[in-house]
Image: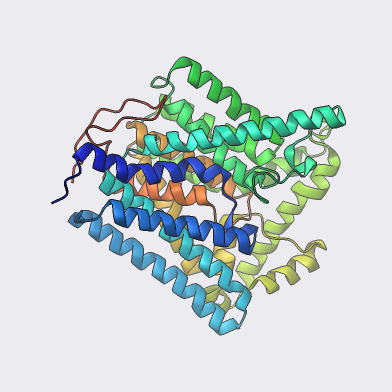
Amino acid sequence: MSTVPAGSRSAVQVAPLLGFAALLPLLPRPTAGLVGLLLVSSASTLLLVSFAVSCARVPLPPPVARTSGLLLAFGSLVVGAELVKVYATEDWSEVQYAAGRALAVTLSLSVFLWVRLAGVSASRVVHAFLLGYLALCCMMIAIAVTGVAIFEELRPSRELGITIPFPKTAGVPRSFGELAILSGLAWAYLLVRRHDLSRPFWWTAAVLVNLSVLISQSRTGLLAWLVVSLAWLLVSAVRSAVVLRAAVLAVLCTPLLVDWVVQRFSDASVVSSVVGQSTFENNVFLRLDLNETALRLLTRSGLADALYGQSRDTWLQAVQRSTGESTELHNHVLAALLFSGVLIGVLVLVVLYLLPLWRLAGRAGDDDARLLYLAGLGSLFALQFYPGFFSLTVSLLVGLGWAEVYGRTRDAPGEGGAAGAPDLSPVTSRQ
């Protein structure tokens, strides 16, 4: 038997997870290159080792064991399909995507297990994440002020090209699709927990988060903020699971809505003056063309391509012919279907995003479920305008969503929250 007191033991279990969540906004994406992949892989490995050490001698409850087995089988199937595709096509550049998928599922599964066994609430983990994101907000604001001092006008951080603290760090200086996911999660937390946080802390955090969205000058970030805000109003006014699930399907169809709006209003003088016609020609229309090219490849692909998915070389050749550009597909949903195959792509979308959101919509009366529902809608929206096949924040959200959907746990007795964190009363897990 361990001699460590229960409260201290629980604090030891929770501390590495909260520390990882706080550092998450400052870590580079694995797609930033080999250095970023090695760095994040090392951090994830350390997370798993810390989990194994801190949760030693804790038996898995049968429901957790069953769910973990199913999720592990899902991850093995997805990664195995990627490796089969690599072997069949002999396109060894696809190995990095298989490694990214394996790392994403492993990280989500470790978060799920940690939350279930350590008894920490989703709100407490997201509060730690918020503290890290506020540090990132301060960096972005400092870069913007530097831009005003140098150029005498507000400049977003990507135009300054300052690569701190890491190259390709989420939001500093370029990855604004990732920034939309980060800011959406932070904003969802502030909306849901606004009555539990001290007023000075809430207003300070709200100002910093919203300034980061404005300073980035990212359309995806602004629209993701709007999606989270509208979803919060919807959840506050309507508790019907049918309506909230319909909202999930509506967000999934947003590229079609954007296409319809752009086609009809791109020539309007007010739109041209606010956004700029060159922006529409060089960016918005290009992304719509990329979506059309992806849909054309999906509908015209043979059986083998539908099962294995298209290679990146095939995509680059097709998009070069249709648009004259060689660029990534800026739609994570279509990319999952196109590059992983229809069957695996649908499985990935259902298990990672749609099923958790579908079930969270039925539990929106609970604060943690409402938080994850709002953040999930914001990230699902942003992923449809973002090419990243791997996001650490999305992996964290998926793991927290699994833990909430398949049986919640609450803060264990004797645990104190972080400064400014909501005081959640101890509740024993239903399992």
Q: Is residue 294 left or right of residue 9?
A: right
- Give the mark count: 0
User: In the picture shown, does residue 391 fall above or below 224?
Assistant: below
- Can I make out residue 109 in this image? no
Residue 240, percent across and down? 36, 33
Viewer-nearest residue: 429 or 286: 429
Q: Residue at x 61, y 33 (%)?
A: 137
Q: Nearer the viewer, residue 387 or 117?
A: 117
Q: Is residue 268 left or right of residue 23?
A: right
Q: Residue at x 70, y 31 (%)?
A: 142
Q: Is residue 345 shown above or below 228?
A: below
Q: Quadrant of residue 62?
A: bottom left
Give the residue at the far left of this rendering. Answer: 1
Which residue lies at the image location 53% right of the left edge and 19% below the top edge?
A: 203
**Viewer-side residue, 268 vs 60:** 60
The x and y percentages for residue 337 are 55, 64
Whether residue 73 is visible here, answered yes or no, is yes
Question: How are the colours assigned in the image?
Answer: rainbow
Q: Nearer the viewer, residue 222 or 213?
A: 213
Identified at 43% across, 28% down, the residue is: 192
Name the residue furthest front. Answer: 3
Location of residue 40 in the rendering, given as x and y in whole percent from the top left corner: 53, 56
